[in-house]
Every structure is written in structure tokens, then in C-alpha cells.
Image (cartoon, helix red, strand yellow):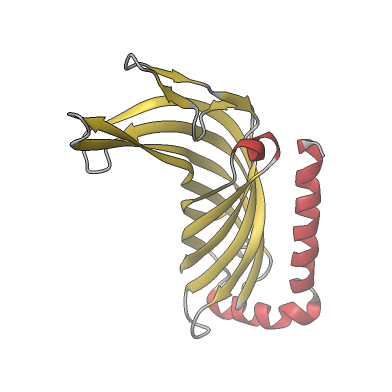
Amino acid sequence: MGRGRREPMLLASMLALAGTFASPGATSGQEYVADRHGGPGAAVNVSFLGANALGDFGTVVDHGFGLELGGGLPMAADGLLRLRGDFGFLIYGHEQVHYCDYGCRVGSSVSTTNSMIFAGIGPELVFGAGDVQPYLHGSAGASWFVTSSSYPDGGPSTTNYWDVSFAWRAGGGLRFRMGSPMSPIYLDLGVTHHDNQPVSYLTEGDIVDNPDGTITMYPNLSDADFLSFKLGVSIAIR
């Protein structure tokens, strides 16, 4: 399935989910809470991420994990439309190579990590201001794919390879209030489709050590799309 057809299907599914919570029977209580607390308003978020690679990226990468930080500022009086910004990283590959020194009486190792740093900004639409808040979001930004090596016990780190890609993101989720109706803390569950335009990157095994001490790299060039699954905390700022 082409990239241009996946995101509309994802958004349609999320809209259907949001519609369930936005029905009159589901929102009467939410409107009452919104009247008392003034709508969702601004918020800051911190989340753990798990990722599943898609398409060409998925043929050379399996899974990843990382962390995401973000926040939103209200763009409407009721706070249901926000300007959202996200910044995060994912590690999608790691390997450790062991070497023999001094006749193998003393050994050393080098650790190599394949990671991606991403950032984006765009709108977020929140469906209600109650104890359960469905939301959709989209953003435009960039992703930086970088491979670096270092000694596990410290010391200098070397960037072996890097490239930058333009990126679109679309996703949604549910926030559940934790504690009393006055609590500003929400459990945040969500999924996001990361659409990274063609980019050059390394995966595990793409750096080969030669007998003469040099290295040879075999970069991949493709779209680098994946789904990220979020488990985090959102803190409302009144």
C-alpha cells in the first residue's frame, strides 16, 4: 500500500474512535467538567516510546524504543485546539564488537548505536475536556538519523554516519485523568505514524572493520516509516 493512502486510513480510524467519545451521551459529563475547569488548556508531556518499522525500513530494522517530550499551547478559547510541539529520540539498532589486544590477554570492545532524533510542530484537536480526552494530532518537522560508536566504559564518542530527512507525523490517542476531577495529571496512551522521506542510514552490521584498521560502511537509502506507541503522562497547566 502506498504511503499516500496509509495516513488517511489511520486518521479515519482515529476520527471514528473520537466520534464515539464525542457523542452527546458521552460528552455531557465532559462539558460539565470543562465549565468548571476551563477546558484542557496548555499541557506538557513525557512518554516512553516503542516503535515498529514499516515498509522498506521494516526489511532491515525490527523494533525500537525511546523517549518523547512535548507540550501544547491553546489556540482557541476553550483550549480544545492546541499548537503542539514534540521532540524525541529512538534507538533502532545496537551492536558491540570485541577486540583482542596484547595476545588476547587484554580485551576491549566498541559499542555502536543506530538512533533517530526527531522534532515536529503542528495542530492537536482534543475531543472534550472531561476525565477521558480523545485527541488527534499532525505535525511537520525533521528526523536526524545518526550512527555513533564509543567505548562502553566511557571515553570519546565518534559519529560514524548521519543524514537528515523531512518528516510528516499523524496520530492520536486517549488521555485518562488520574485521581480526583481536579487533578491536572493524565495517563496518555497514543499511536503515531512517522512518515520519513527518503534518507540514508546505517543498521546493525552495516559497518565492517577491515584488517588494515579502516572501516567500510554500507548505508541504506529508503523511506524510513514506522509506528510509535506511546505510554506517558500529560500534565495540564491552568
Indicate left or right for 101 with 24 as reference.
Answer: left
Residue ID at (75%, 59%): 14
Q: Residue drawn 79% across and 47% down?
A: 8
- Closer to the camera in the image, 144 or 24: 144
72 over 30 or under it: above or below: above
Residue 73 visible to an observer of this rendering: no
Nearest the camera: 37 or 23? 23
User: Percent from the top left, x then y, of residue 230?
Assistant: 56, 59
Q: Visible in this render: residue 10?
A: yes
Question: Residue 151: x percent and y percent?
Answer: 26, 37
Residue sitting at the far top: 212
Image quadrant in which you'd find residue 172:
bottom right
Q: Name the quarter where the N terminus is drawn.
A: top right
Q: Classify residue 7 as left or right of residue 64.
A: right
Where residue 84 appears, as percent x and y from the top left, is: 55, 51
Q: Is residue 59 left or right of residue 163?
A: right
Residue at 50%, 86% (x, y): give it.
Answer: 180
Q: How many labels were placed on the picture?
A: 0
Name the spot of residue 58 as percent of width and height, x first: 65, 40
Instruction: Write the residue at 48% across / 66% down.
Output: 233
Q: Residue furthest bottom?
A: 180
